[in-house]
Amino acid sequence: MSPLQIRSVPHRKAGRWPILATVGALASTLPVLGCGGEVQPPLDTQDVQQVTGNVGTMAAPPGAATTIAFQTFEDDIGTRGSTETRTLIRSARGYQDFFGHAPPPAVDFSHEWVMFYGAGLKPIADDASFLSLLRSGRSLIAITQLIAPGAGCVSVQAVGTPHALIKFPAQAGTTAQFFRQDGTRDCGPQLCAAVQCPAGSDCDPATGKCHAACPPVCEIFCDNGNVLDANGCATCKCNPPPTDPCATVKCAAGTHCDSGKCLADGVTCGGIAGKPCPGVGKCVDNPNDSCDPQTGGADCGGICTCVQNVACTADSKFDSSPSVCACVPIKPPVCGPVCQIYCEYGNVLDANGCPTCKCNPAPIDLCATVKCAAGTHCDTGKCVADSVSCGGFAGKACPGIGKCVDDPKDSCDPKAGGADCIGICSCVQNVLCTADSRFDGSPSVCACVHL
């Protein structure tokens, strides 16, 4: 087995480059455990841990190891995939130094780490991936896998850089140890075993039929593989980089882009310090980490969720983002200057509640076309009985059995010294009429009248 090359990449300063050394040169200061290629710098002091070259296989994982959930993601790796390398990245600064650009918005180094596996230059049919991620004490164990086509698969001449990127919850206090578990892909029955194709053509293993042979390919390197022609042959054109759905999305503060959509940033809570959630937020278990509060993880860190369970005042609104989760004041609109015009019925307002240079029309008179009978008048488009005055200094009585009550529309209150206040008559039927009469409930009559 060829010796491992171990690269430690601290934050890159102007005029300085990462130092590359062999295991033999660093044996006294940088221990390596077995063929797994474990790198043990001072804990959590490096942004990047890198193991270059081949690594060994693992017979069996440690008995006390726990599985760490991870997610794959895509990003521009530049030329990092051209050499076989396995790398742990602990910070956004390390990501920038390693790949030459900032991490994508979907990666949050405040609580996540990243691993990169580049298999080097391989046939484009090869597939690289992370098989599993384990933690055993201070060891962060990553097992990579490279799957190559088997004997019955199509032979592809073009080469690429099979690679994989994963993100996972940060594992403080650990160092990386890499192993591999490679294999081959079974391509099914060999349909071309008994097929003899004429000169200039090849047998398609998928169909067992002959087709034109693929011509030689230009000696070019394509990060994302070659464009294939109608016969499935590699051309001299490179595939474009994968489209970033978040490239043109701008999200508000407290949110981030994920798969083209703006989502609220995760707010952490709980843990050994018992960190509370903002406002009326509730701390729940984080499904993306390996710590379970129901299986002994009493000090697990959680994430904040927000459900409105309070009523806000008229001058406030509820902000349901996990970072606020409370009623916040409604900011009045900031209005620009208005035209110097006089509007009898006020200015027309825009969507922000600001006055415009247009005037409101005159209010519609709902009684303009309404004709009411004698003893009634129009009020908001409806005919209502005229009020009948009573009381006052002369003690004017109400017609019929009507009752004199205080007029709520004047400022005179009989209960506050206004003994001579003028009132209005109200009428409530409390008598029975004969068969040849009916009760007239208008305040101006309030009595039985003949039919």
Image: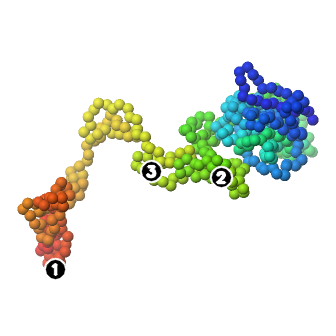
In the image, is 82 to the left or to the right of 425? right
Label 2 sits on what residue type? Asp
Please identify the quarter of the rendering in which residue 87 is found.
top right
Amino acid type, residue under disc 3 in the picture: Cys
The residue identified by callout 1 is 435
Reading the image, the residue beneath label 2 is 285
| In this view, 323 is above or below 447 | above
Whether residue 235 is visible here, answered yes or no, is no
Query: Who comes first in sequence, dot 3 or dot 1?
Result: 3
Residue with the most extreme front position = 273
Residue in view at x 17 percent, y 78 percent? 432
Sequence order check, earlier mark of 3 and 2? 2
Residue occupying the point 66% across, 48% down? 271
Q: Is residue 110 left or right of residue 218?
A: left
> Is residue 87 shown left or right of residue 58?
left
Task: Name the disc covering residue 153, or none.
Answer: none
